[in-house]
Image (cartoon, rainbow, N blue to C red):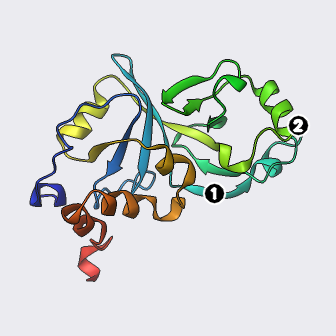
Amino acid sequence: MDALNLISVPFKNKEAEKGKLLIAEPFLSDPYFKRSVVLLTEHNEKGSFGFILNKPIDLRLNDAIGDMPQIDAPIHLGGPVGRESLHFLHTLGDKLNGSLEVIPGLYWGGDFDQLKTLINTQQVQPNDIRFFVGYAGWSPNQLDEELERNDWMIVPAKLDYIMKQDTQDLWNNILTNLGHEYAVIANFPQDPGMN
């Protein structure tokens, strides 16, 4: 019996949809998704798409892209798919043409040249934007099957979780904020055999 079946998990039966967070169950062993928090930016009959929020990599944006205006912005591993692609989430709204709203106040993508101009004119601060290399993707029904296996819990996304939190502790912080039963999950050792 997996850890999520040991307690009542009221969020596990909610539907996956754009703007929700996927919280990995404590013993998910996949190296990309172990104790990860994924923001879903798309979920429909064609599949699901999102970004791992809590996997920073040791690379700054200006080190990765030579012609970027100077901004002290880290890059996160968004997922195992398309690792040659760069994506971004931001709070710039209609300042950036082509942005898609994910939740109120949070947007995905937009005109990259316009973004460079906004950075260059100091209209973008590091806490306004998060960059990702690659993304998390699921084929049609694949995510639903993982949810049936209790690989993930679904919780509402909050702007603070996505843009303001220390990403190293995001998985623990979200579970702890959900209440006592979830705080117990957050404290499960990663390898119960070592306990």
Q: Distance of mark 2 from mark 1, alpha carbons?
A: 27 Å
Q: Quadrant of the C terminus?
A: bottom left
Q: Which marked residue is nearer to the observer: mark 2 or mark 1? A: 2
Measured as percent of width and height from the top left, residue 94 is found at 66, 22
Query: Image point 46% across, 51% down: which residue?
Result: 32
Q: Earlier in the sequence, mark 2 or mark 1?
A: 1
Image x and y of residue 108, in percent: 58, 30
The residue located at (88%, 37%) in the rendering is: 121
Q: Amino acid at mark 2?
A: Thr
State left or right for residue 8 relative to residue 183: left
Residue topped by disc 2: 121
Q: Does 111 appear above or below 7?
A: above
Check the image and report above or below for 186 versus 65: below
Amino acid type assigned to the residue bearing label 1 in the image = Ile
Query: Which residue is label 1 attached to?
Result: 57
Residue 145, position in %: x, y? 23, 34
